[in-house]
Amino acid sequence: MSDAAAPFRQAAMPAVAAMQAGIILCLVAGAATGRAWLGDASAGLALIWIATQWTLLIPMARLFVALAAAGVAAAAVLLPDALPGLWRAVVQGTGFAALMMVLGFLRQPVKRAALTRDAAGYLLGLPPGRRYGAVLSGAQAMALMFNVGIIPMIGDLTEPADGRDARADPARRAMVAAAMRGAALVTIWSPLSLGFAIVTTGLPALEPLRLIAIAFGFTMAMLAATARWPLLPAEARPGRDAGPAGQGRAAALALVLAASAGLLAATILLHRATGLGFTLTAVTVLPVFTLGWLALEGPRGSFGRRLGEGLAALGDLRSESALFMAANVIGAALSAAIQASPLWPLLMSGGFASLPVLLAAFASIPLAASLYLPNSIFVVMAAQVLGPTALGEHHPTALGLALCIGWAVAICVNPISAMTLITGRLCGVSAARVAHRWNLRFALAVMACGALLIAAVYRAGG
């Protein structure tokens, strides 16, 4: 075989990656052509894929898959009419799983690129008085592509060149905390985030672009306020006289921000042009963007190797994929059970669609997360259960804001969220300390402002 074929040999997919690619392709093709059997095929492949990955899943993912299977079995006996709806939940959940796959595919090449590290280094080289706000805001934009990966990147770039252990340095801790908070806040409004995908899928009456506009304005206000008042304890407070924590080029930052903006614009435009939900538009746009990145970044002749590494990363978030898919089915089973119960007329009444009920749902998300319950599972089930009720039908924007803002705050106060775990490891403290001490005042401030916004949108009839 000629050397010209070497890139293709290097990019050959193992069977598991090929199966994941099949899941994504069938899902996108089914949505684009309107052929439901392709979506069914994607869901079937996803179930087979989960079975092949069973021993590699974390215990919580295995537990929720088992609970989902039990819920389907119970419905088959007690509520057979609900089975078509449960299968639709499997197909919807396959969309969430596919989104996690393509996020892993994107993150692999992007996090290793010299351009992105150069961009983050520029933020860290700004004057101390502006550095925390710059990293907070920059992480917000860069997390559109990196997701949680922006936190270890900032942690790596702030490590001393001489190898000293700087985990206890308050100024360095502040930079890592800023990256974590920026990455968490972007989930309030980003159509590329899993939380937004879950909320817009679970609330059929919701207008996604309206939610994006309101949530984006709120997030920008929170960024401005918390950049001015970081609300961090002394052990993780930004330094006012610290030297540069990194170095980079403004041009690199501009290119990364332009790429993030282009990715966001492509997703929104595809949604407007096709009418597809944001889960499917993100699953469509992200692989194309990643392939373009791989083609442009890196030395000539390395495309095949880097593509192979990216395809292998499709499975990096396998546990999360299985977890969200299972949670969607569990939420659908609970919703079906509630609709068949005497509670349903009450939930569909105007009395249930009240502001106190909405604010109680909002507060329960971070409260449950602070008690070590996975916020993702809670929000998936809340969207599935509340979406068809009077609250979801008459006030979808207010409910969407409650779930999206609650999701972001829950990330910050949950000791078992990926972001708090990474932050605690990089800063030499427990994740519980990050969640319950470092982020407490910040979370309360965002919750208070969020409650005011939700109440205003509710009063306006949204």
Image (cartoon, grey):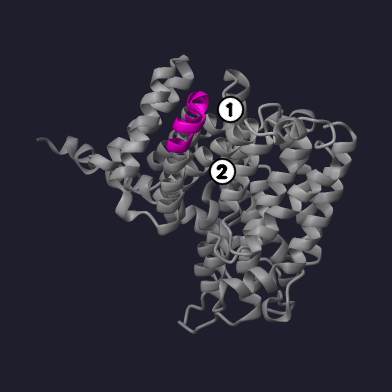
The secondary element bearing badge 2 is classed as helix
Which element type, helix, strand or loop, lies under badge 1? loop
Q: Which residue is mark 1?
A: 277
Q: Residues within 10 Å of mark 2 (few under 14, many from 20)?
A: many
The answer to whether any part of residue 191 appears in the image is: no
Could you tell me which residue is drawn at 40 percent across and 37 percent down? 291
Kindly tell me whether residue 8 is visible in this rendering: yes
Where residue 74 appears, x then y in whole percent?
A: 46, 37
15 and 180: which is toward the camera: 15
Q: Is residue 449 shown above or below 244?
A: above
Q: Residue at x 64, y 31 (%)?
A: 339
Residue type marked 1: Gly
Q: Quadrant of the N terminus?
A: top left
- Which residue range is magenta in the image? 72-86
Earlier sequence position, callout 1 versus callout 2: 2
* Residue 200, percent from left and from top: 64, 34
